[in-house]
Image (cartoon, rainbow, N blue to C red):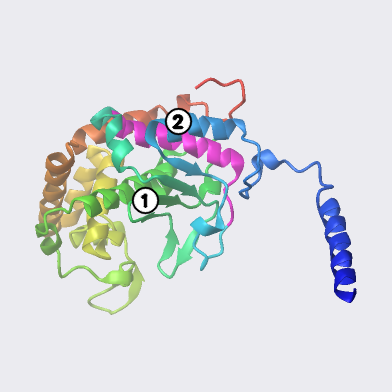
């Protein structure tokens, strides 16, 4: 009898709890940042199905999921409106640039099957992480809440999102089919691991943050490229596609004779790899990307309404 009595009390308590927990009828479940199997699909969910899942078999996760996130870092979810704007930007400027160059089947096969958004930056000793690619299966984009859809800054979009997308996708490609190992040997003595961001003056020994110009003179397209060969390879693609010919020519001029020779030798390997292995002409891809980037101001990046027909 005592055991039955306790079970009866527990049943009453759980019933009261369930009733109390369901009194919040004003909660906007459609825009919740947390996953819920029973949630009602909103207009953005339907747009994502038509524009990501249906054509590319890609899941675009804008509701932050613990299982998809780095538990060692303090992170916040992406704002709903920022996620809408970024989903449109990534599709139009990045994904459809590859479609235009190589046809839609290319991304259908090789694009990671999950894009996961994080609202905040993630930090390491060397600074902020803007994106990660995990085994060719998932790309995570950070700092989504910095996006200002009302005041688009293309340089900032490049720095935070588009260079990240090109960089992480380059990892997917070379992990699928490796590049010529001769690339690694061009500046093999220049890779310095996690200290890539530190520059030590050879005369005074004084340390400071490494600049782009210092990296160029050492034969690297960015300071981060000095961390290891695979990052160097991915940075070559990201920097070439997202910058104009004028930028690239200036980089070679500032690099000096030795630095320019190393930069050019490595990039030729990258260029030939992308052309011969994947059928991608980086000059054409850059032209397409920069054109689409210039058309951003014509896009409607606002919240999607149910009446929209995509």
Question: Residue at label 2?
Answer: 51
How far from the left and from the top, in percent, is residue 141?
45, 50
- Residue 248 or residue 174, whichever sits in front: 174
Quadrant of the rendered image containing residue 135:
bottom left
Question: Residue at label 1?
Answer: 137
Residues shaded magenta = 76-99
**In this view, which residue lies farthest toward the bottom?**
205
Q: Main secondary structure of the magenta part?
A: helix
Secondary structure, mark 2, is helix
Secondary structure, mark 1, is loop
Quadrant of the rendered image containing residue 191:
bottom left
How far from the left and from the top, in percent, is residue 98?
29, 34
Q: Residue at x 24, y 59 (%)?
A: 230
How far from the left and from the top, in percent, is residue 40?
65, 37
Crowd tier of the residue under label 1, counting other residues whose Cα lies within 10 Å: few below 14, some 14–19, many 20 or above: some
Mark 2 vs 1: CB contact within 8 A: no
Q: Is any part of residue 148 visible from this angle?
A: no
- Residue 81 or residue 50, whichever sits in front: 50
Q: Residue at x 11, y 41 (%)?
A: 276
How far from the left and from the top, in percent, is residue 186?
11, 61
Measure how far apart labels 2 and 1 are at the Cα level.
19 Å
């Amino acid at each position: 009898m005592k055991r039955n009595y306790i079970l009866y009390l527990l049943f009453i308590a759980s019933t009261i709890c369930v009733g109390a927990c369901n009194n919040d009828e004003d909660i906007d479940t459609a825009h919740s940042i947390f996953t819920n199997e029973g949630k009602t699909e909103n207009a953005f969910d339907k747009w994502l199905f038509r524009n990501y899942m249906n054509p590319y078999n890609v899941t675009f996760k804008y509701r932050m999921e613990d299982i998809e996130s780095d538990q060692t870092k303090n992170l916040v979810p992406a704002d709903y409106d920022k996620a809408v704007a970024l989903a449109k930007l990534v599709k139009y400027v990045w994904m459809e640039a590859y479609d235009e160059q190589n046809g839609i089947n290319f991304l259908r096969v090789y694009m990671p099957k999950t894009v996961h958004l994080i609202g905040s930056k993630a930090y390491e000793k060397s600074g902020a992480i803007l994106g990660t690619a995990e085994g060719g299966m998932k790309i995570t984009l950070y700092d989504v809440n910095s996006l200002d859809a009302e005041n688009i800054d293309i340089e900032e979009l490049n720095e935070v999102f588009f260079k990240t997308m090109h960089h992480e996708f380059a990892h997917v490609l070379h992990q699928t089919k490796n590049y010529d190992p001769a690339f690694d040997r061009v500046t093999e003595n220049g890779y310095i691991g996690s200290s890539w961001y530190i520059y030590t003056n050879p005369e005074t020994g004084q340390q400071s943050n490494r600049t782009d110009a210092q990296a160029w003179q050492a034969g690297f397209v960015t300071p981060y490229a000095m961390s290891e060969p695979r990052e160097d390879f991915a940075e070559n693609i990201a920097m070439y596609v997202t910058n104009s010919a004028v930028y690239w020519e200036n980089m070679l001029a500032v690099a000096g004779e030795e630095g320019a020779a190393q930069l050019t030798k490595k990039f030729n390997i990258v260029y030939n790899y992308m052309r011969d292995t994947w059928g991608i002409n980086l000059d054409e891809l850059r032209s397409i990307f920069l054109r689409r980037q210039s058309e951003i101001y014509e896009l409607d990046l606002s919240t999607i309404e149910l009446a929209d027909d995509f």
